[in-house]
Image (cartoon, rainbow, N blue to C red):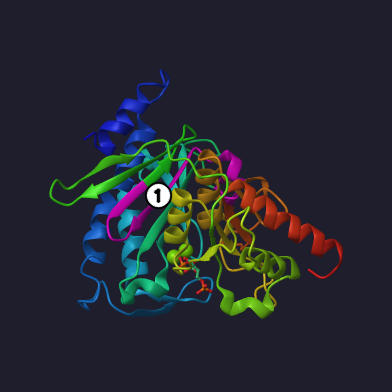
Amino acid sequence: MITLGEYIVKKQSEYPNATGELTSLLSSIRRAAKVVNREINRAGLVSDIIGGSFGRENAQGEVQQKLDVFANDIFKAALEARGEVCGIASEEEDDFVVFDSHTSANSKYVVLMDPLDGSSNIDVNVSIGTIFSIYRRISEPGGPVTLEDFLQPGINQIAAGYVVYGSSTMLVYTTGNGVHGFTYDPSLGSFGLSHENIRIPEQGQIYSINEGNYIKFPEGVKKYIKFCQEKDDDSKRPYTSRYIGSLVSDFHRNMLKGGIYIYPSGTSAPNGKLRLLYECNPLAFLAEQAGGKATDGFRRIMEIKPTELHQRTPYFVGSIRMVDKAGEFMTQYSSLGTE
Ligand SMILES: O=P(O)(O)OC[C@H]1O[C@](O)(COP(=O)(O)O)[C@@H](O)[C@@H]1O
Ligand SMILES: [Mg+2]
Ligand SMILES: [Mg+2]
């Protein structure tokens, strides 16, 4: 078994100019994932780290769970410790955080993260995740870190990935050279290569959307859901509806089996729920690297120029032919002004 650490180093050797900073940064994430995984495995045993609300709201007005805060602290500390990162932005931090140690201040990377994805599933033993996105800063190393360092379009990402804490724990990442998955082996305490060069099937039979919000959906989405539910032997419809309620877990399943995940805009959430910078862009990079697609119903997600740290966007991601089909319905009904 080749471990994640060995694989990252091996990949680095393919880049003669590589400095090892990204390798070290990725291994900080690997180490933090192990610590968070250990706590998640005993979720349910209520303590000051896990089990229930932290009793405070984040910038988006969501009540933070204890594990949201714990995961945020663990990843933040791990990213600061090695000095390869000059600053982070996180779902659980109102503003971006600058690391001011000498090494950090001179480093060239910023990280954006959703430390704990699927928070509503923490206390009910359903799989959850962590999402991360890595950019080269725009500002000069050694100089002040600015908001512009974080408000970069997804196409500028250097690397992205997620950890899914499910029946097994996996870390899946890309550096723009394919998508690779590693499964955690608790007996060895390391991640082993289990899914090299993941490819999303162009067409799947799974659609993932919270149909509880159906009446609030744009007409294009309502029509696409009906399309998924209609019988048509040629295209193996009706498709199967699967919705875990943890973006990482729904995305991971659809990436391996084929499928589409949609979190649309709605009458009560005009820009949808998901955050462009640390949920949608990193998974869009992975989806595209695996042969899939990610849009807001109309535009390529990774070409959207962000304006705010916690901005939301409608999200359509997964098998390329399914995202295209959903896009056709969105265009057709938005042009009819019935969006
Ligand atoms: O309950 P809803 O409205 O369907 O939302 C579920 C979605 O919200 C999220 O939980 C948002 O992420 P966080 O848990 O990180 O806030 C996604 O993981 C998930 O897909
Ligand atoms: Mg999330
Ligand atoms: Mg979260």
Can residue 119 be seen here? yes
Does the magenta segment cover residue 161? yes
Q: Where is residue 198 in the image (x, y as percent from the top left)?
A: 43, 40
Residue positioned most to the left = 187
Q: Pointer 1: what residue?
A: 99
At 67% from the left and 45% from the top, the residue drawn is 303
| Vertical side of 280 occupied by 191: above or below | above
Front residue of 287 and 91: 287
Does the magenta segment cover residue 191? no
Can residue 83 be seen here? no
Where disc 1 sits, the SS reads loop
At 14% from the left and 45% from the top, the residue drawn is 188
Quarter placement of the C terminus? bottom right
Residue positioned most to the front = 233
Front residue of 286 and 231: 231
Q: Where is residue 296 in the image (x, y as percent from the top left)?
A: 67, 57
Q: What stretch is highlighted in magenta?
A: 146-171
Q: Position of residue 328 (x, y in %)?
A: 75, 55
Residue positioned most to the right = 336
Front residue of 150 and 227: 227
Q: What residue type is labelled 1?
A: Phe
At 32% from the left and 51% from the top, the residue drawn is 170
